[in-house]
Image (cartoon, grey):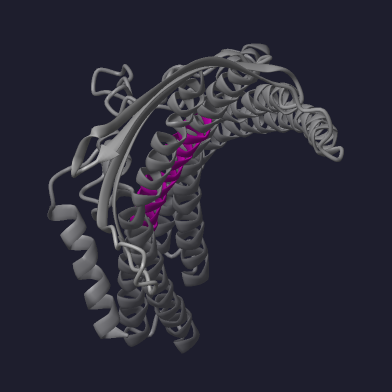
């Protein structure tokens, strides 16, 4: 146990001696280096290519081809003259332009834009979730450090009480029971200290996983800015900014476009076509010939075994499902905002109450210690007061952690969580150019 305590204490010391780190810096580092967010960014880049692919159907389609061949003809009939080897070449160029597609291109373009909007919202949701996770890990590390510090102080207090009880026992003032009680509390405090140091090590590793580096003297995070003033404004902000809602709305637009695209497959299409081809024999220039063609192709599917109608019905059913998913997303966002608002109010009250509890417990501890020295308090009473002080300190650390997380969870619920700048403003996230087309 002594070795474990020394190693964990060394970890705590290493964290404290590094350069100071702020919540904004931790969020920035996570956004730049987190592999999960980087993967989501690449998926968004891939989705953005759906738009030029959809637009390409409305642009001219040009192709060029060429070929060369050699033929050997052999005859078994001696009366037929063998013409020998022939070598020919051909080239062709073709161009086509869609003139009328019954809304195919428009529908596919709308679908692509909806896909991009949904992917952008998903990326923004993943980014805000990462920032919330970083804020939670940041607060967890600070809480773990505060708990370790409180338990270290508790061990020191109990060590002092144990020494005092031992001296009193040697002087014949107290019994062996008083000394044993102090010894038991001291041993328990040392065990709980080791457990707290282990929990701090786990919190440090969770922070490292998200941010990409270990914590370094984490500073107290400032109060979050941009919080809604009341529940109504919170819900209104969520309607406009929640990535969950924006993604669900984009899915409904995508489903609507897919219905039009499926129905357009059974309608008229008109395409203008032109072509040029040329060919000749390598050994005979007089054999060269060319061909030009210009025309209009009209295509109307007459019977496809019910395939187009089936696909249209399928897309309509999916559109209905998307509308229901949107309704479910609206309920989910309303629940998240309401719970976040309630949690924030509770966290604010808890911090104030916990601070008052710590102040009162510290005052009571000092009074009980003085009364013990004058013989007015027993050892057990002092030990109980030490435990009350520790409980108050741990409760304050938990309340401060909960307030930091509750503020950021409120911002994430309404869709406005971002990286705080040193001046208290927000850092614009335009560097990756991933807002869609």
Residue 307 vs residue 374, the one in the foreground: 307
Q: Can residue 61 be seen here?
A: no
- Quarter the C terminus occupies: top left
Which image quadrant: the N terminus? bottom left
Asked whether 293 or 319 is in front, the reply is 293
Number of marks present in the image shown? 0
The relative height of residue 390 versus residue 271 in the rendered view (above or below) is below
Residue 323 locus on image (x, y percent): 78, 26
Instruction: Answer left or right for 91 relative to 184.
Output: left
33 relative to 122 in the view: left or right: left
| Residue situated furthest front in the rendering | 79
From the image, give the main secondary structure of the stretch colored magenta.
Answer: helix
Q: Is residue 237 shown above or below 142? A: above
Q: Residue at x 30, y 80 (%)?
A: 167
Q: Would you identify the image quadrant in which residue 330 lies?
A: top right
Residue under the point 28% across and 46% down: 88
Q: Quadrant of residue 90?
A: top left
* Residue 281 place in picture, x, y as percent: 25, 42
Instruction: Choose between 94 and 178: the one closer to the eye.
Output: 94
**Residue 170 lies in the magenta stretch:** no
**Residue 324 seen by the camera:** yes
Residue depicted at 39% across the width and 72% down the height: 77
| Image spot of residue 213 (x, y percent) | 23, 53
Q: Magenta part of the protein: which range?
A: 121-148
User: What x and y, as percent, mark residue 360?
Assistant: 48, 42
Q: Is residue 429 left or right of residue 119?
A: left
């Amino acid at each position: 146990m002594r070795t474990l305590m020394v190693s964990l204490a060394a970890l705590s010391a290493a964290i404290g001696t590094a350069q100071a780190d702020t919540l904004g810096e931790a969020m920035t580092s996570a956004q730049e280096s987190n592999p999960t967010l980087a993967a989501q960014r690449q998926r968004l880049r891939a989705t953005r290519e759906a738009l030029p692919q959809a637009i390409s159907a409305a642009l001219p389609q040009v192709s060029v081809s060429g070929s060369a061949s050699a033929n050997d003809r052999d005859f078994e009939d001696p009366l037929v003259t063998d013409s020998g080897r022939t070598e020919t070449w051909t080239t062709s160029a073709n161009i086509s332009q869609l003139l009328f597609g019954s809304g195919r291109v428009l529908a596919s373009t709308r679908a692509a834009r909806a896909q991009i909007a949904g992917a952008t919202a998903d990326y923004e949701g993943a980014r805000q979730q990462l920032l919330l996770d970083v804020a939670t890990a940041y607060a967890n590390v600070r809480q773990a450090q505060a708990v370790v510090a409180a338990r270290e102080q508790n061990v020191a207090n109990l060590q002092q009480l144990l020494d005092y009880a031992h001296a009193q026992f040697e002087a014949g003032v107290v019994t062996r029971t008083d000394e044993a009680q102090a010894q038991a509390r001291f041993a328990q405090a040392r065990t709980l200290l080791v457990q707290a140091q282990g929990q701090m090590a786990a919190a440090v590793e969770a922070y490292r996983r998200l941010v990409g580096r270990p914590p370094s003297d984490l500073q107290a995070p400032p109060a979050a800015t941009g919080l809604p003033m009341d529940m109504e404004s919170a819900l209104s902000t969520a309607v406009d900014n929640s990535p969950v809602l924006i993604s669900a709305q984009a899915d409904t637009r995508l489903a609507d476009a897919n219905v039009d695209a499926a129905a357009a497959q059974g309608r008229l299409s008109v395409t203008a076509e032109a072509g040029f081809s040329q060919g000749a024999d390598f050994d005979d220039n007089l054999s060269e010939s060319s061909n030009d063609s210009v025309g209009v192709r009209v295509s109307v599917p007459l019977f496809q075994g019910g395939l187009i109608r089936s696909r249209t019905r399928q897309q309509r059913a999916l559109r209905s499902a998307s509308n229901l998913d949107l309704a479910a997303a609206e309920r989910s966002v309303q629940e998240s905002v309401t719970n976040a608002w309630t949690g924030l109010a509770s966290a604010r009250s808890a911090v104030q109450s916990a601070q008052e509890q710590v102040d009162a417990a510290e005052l009571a501890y000092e009074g009980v210690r003085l009364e013990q020295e004058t013989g007015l308090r027993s050892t057990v009473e002092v030990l109980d007061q030490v435990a009350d002080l520790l409980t108050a300190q741990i409760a304050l650390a938990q309340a401060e952690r909960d307030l930091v997380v509750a503020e950021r969870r409120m911002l994430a619920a309404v869709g406005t969580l971002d990286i705080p700048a040193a001046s208290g403003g927000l850092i614009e996230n335009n560097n990756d150019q991933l807002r869609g087309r």
